[in-house]
Image (tube, coloured by chain):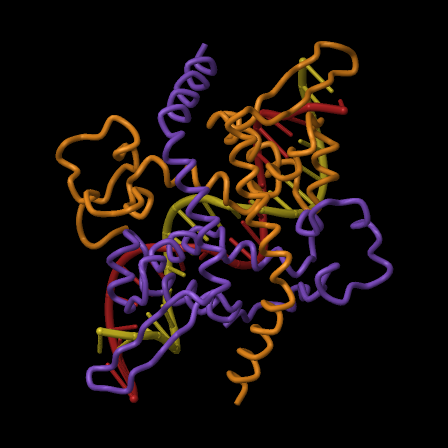
Chain colours: A purple, B orange, C yellow, D red
Amino acid sequence: MSTGSARTPQTAPCASGVGSPDEAAVDQLTFDVLASRCSSRPVLEHITGRWGTLVLIALHEGPTRFNELRRRVDGVSEKMLAQSLHALERDGFVERTVHSTIPPRVEYELTPLGRRTTDKLHELVNLLEDAMPQVLASQTAYDEDAAA
Amino acid sequence: MSTGSARTPQTAPCASGVGSPDEAAVDQLTFDVLASRCSSRPVLEHITGRWGTLVLIALHEGPTRFNELRRRVDGVSEKMLAQSLHALERDGFVERTVHSTIPPRVEYELTPLGRRTTDKLHELVNLLEDAMPQVLASQTAYDEDAAA
DNA sequence: CAGTATCCGAGAGGATACTG
DNA sequence: CAGTATCCTCTCGGATACTG
């Protein structure tokens, strides 16, 4: 796994967890997540990471098998899919069910928490896709301006 | 880089954009973004990327200057902040205003689109922070199970 | 089918120095 | 203050091969 040298452990929970009294920099922030070394940061990244969001959205349709998921999330590699799924399962957003048959059948589905989370993601992506024409226009304008 | 053929440039707009009639692979997907080579993917990544989300949330409080933003988003480097801000500005989520004074004063603020987007992010993060105890518990359970 | 293990290149991202 | 430019490291993530 992550061999290398002892990189600092990012195991410091914020308000959400225990929280060390010394770390007072968090006090007036609306969102704990803005403070680094917060336990919610990595979790947010699992969800909003490159594949996390897409995997969650793909799972929104119901229980799905590994390879079906791979097909659904276009461009994801086995490795990254497995990795995302693991993280999401560990965080409690996804449940993995193994049917001990031959051939093996494994299904992934959203937990209630996962579903609520994915709903938000859904809304975000919807908003985004609706706004795409506007975004594309903005990009063009920006680029032309930069070229001048 | 891909399954043996021309995966090539990611400059192909989906349904959201102009859309080439040939790209029919998107048809039955609920979300275009699940298809790679979709113009909304990179945009989603700017928003949900490691710093994008945090920068947007930090901007939710109103117009903010560069260094103030740096302080607010704990852990971000100058380089990454500038980079995120550029991408967000180009996509039309953030507006940059320069006051030609001495010392120079530059303020960043959310555009209407940026604000709507950030609202969704807000909801997501709120949900997440509320769920943190549950998530932490899930992680612990998962790890203990793996250790056995 | 459902993964894990390994190798390796590309690029994200941090530290530092410099500019306007 | 508000950045840009450079260097350099470490992680991400794709390709490939192998296992149950």
- Provide residue A19's location: percent of width, then percent of height: 78, 63
Closer-to-camera residue (A139/B131): B131
Which residue is at 48% across, 49% downward? A120
- Provide residue A60's location: percent of width, then percent of height: 36, 57
For the image shown, how many numbered marks are present on the structure? Answer: 0
- Provide residue A62's location: percent of width, then percent of height: 32, 63
Q: Is residue A141 above or below residue A96?
A: above
Which residue is at 33% across, 43% downward? B33
**Residue occupying the far left of the picture:** B22
**Residue occupying the far right of the picture:** A22
- Provide residue B40's location: percent of width, then percent of height: 36, 37
Which residue is at 43% across, 52% downward? A53
Closer-to-camera residue (A54/A3): A54
Left or right: C6 as drawn, with respect to B12: right
> Residue C6 occupies which quadrant of the picture?
bottom left
Left or right: B47 as drawn, with respect to D4: left
Q: Is residue B56 above or below residue B75?
A: above
> Residue C2 occupies which quadrant of the picture?
bottom left
Which residue is at 73% across, 18% downward? B105
Q: Is residue C20 above or below residue A28?
A: above
Left or right: B64 as drawn, with respect to B36: right
